[in-house]
Amino acid sequence: MARRPAQVHGFCLVDKPAGMTSHDVVGRLRRRFNERRIGHSGTLDPDATGVLIVAVGNATRLLRFFSDLPKTYTARFITGVATDTLDDSGVVTRTADMSGVTLADARRVAASLTGRIMQVPPMVSAIKVDGKRLHELAREGITVEREAREIEVYSFDVEGPVEVRDGNPVFDVTVTCSSGTYVRTLADDFGTALGGCAHLGNLRRRAIGDFRVGESTCDDDSIDAAELRTVSAGLAHLPRVVVNEDVARWVLTGRPLEAARLGVDSQIAVATPDAVCAVVDDLDRVLAVYRIGDVCRPEVVLPAPLA
């Protein structure tokens, strides 16, 4: 039997509670909106809380345009104890006396871990090696070599010590970083650079780009009463080009268009070279997302305009 076309389209900003997987959130929203086509912009671990951007219906085709947005996290870095998962859900694998670590030491190390750095993904990640996810291998007790990847830490602020555990300091941190950064690995690297070890606790994603946790439309049980943002509002972080009815017809067929014909002015072109823009009609309905250039080419064309 043919799948029913999606009837509901838009974005939902969820404040994911602890103890729920990102997949659990998607499942509840499928029931809430009676739609099968639902996806999210980036997984949060079950123990983590915070912002999860969920797309419904044809808006799922636009999730890729959230992947490069910076992310802001708050967490606790607990020194003196390492675990096999690099966070406080794991088994202790090592301890160290780090009672002499000061706030000045912690901030010095944080500064050294700011900017473009190389990071080795943890074994408890969803990255695939030879067709199998690392966390699946980790559950089997298998450890494999992982290639370091370049990430960027835009800011790394440390406060504390907020408490002392077994004589070792615990620091509150706020990190803004690029997509693909593992904060648990940052905690592990932080402890190593301080001459001992550390692990992650209390991870909370505060923001994805300009989408902040305080703006969420639901949390905990209210997920079942979640409200949708329009597709147009969800793409507010992209440059916007408004086209008339004639150009809209060309856009909906996926036609490449010269920048001037599409309406990409010089200010947008200079500010966002090789970036993308949302193309909307005069009713503020999203038609497509185009790659900006001398000739602008479609990245995604929607089946029909979406408000």
Image: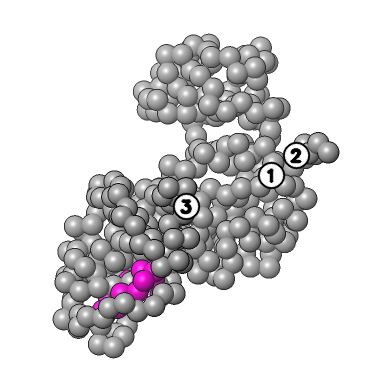
Q: Is 77 covered by the magenta stretch?
A: yes
> Where residue 285 sits: x, y (%)?
66, 30
From the viewer's side, name the closer residue of 274 and 189.
189
> Which residue is depicted at the point 41% across and 22% down?
269
Kind of residue at badge 2:
Ala
SS category of the residue bearing label 3:
strand
Q: How is the image coloured?
A: one colour
SS category of the residue bearing label 2:
loop
> Where residue 302 sits: x, y (%)?
65, 28
Vertical arrangement, residue 50 with respect to residue 11, above or below: below
- Which of the 4 image quadrants contains residue 288? top right
Residue 37, labelled with which disc? 1
Q: Could you tell me if the residues under marks 3 and 1 are in contact, i.e. CB atoms within 8 Å?
A: no
Per the image, the residue denoted by label 2 is 6
The quarter of the rendered structure image containing the C terminus is: top right
> Which residue is depicted at the point 26% across and 81% down?
95
User: Does 258 sit left or right of 93 as displayed?
Assistant: right
User: Does 257 sit left or right of 160 as displayed?
Assistant: right
Vertical arrangement, residue 236 with respect to residue 96, above or below: above
Q: Which residues are magenta?
A: 76-88
From the viewer's side, name the closer residue of 119 and 234.
119
Residue 132, labelled with which disc? 3
For label 1, count other residues whose C-alpha is less than 10 Å away and answer few (under 14), some (14-19) or many (20+): many
Of the two numbered discs 3 and 1 in the rendering, the one whose residue sits closer to the viewer: 3
Q: Could you tell me if the residues under marks 2 and 1 are in contact, i.e. CB atoms within 8 Å?
A: yes
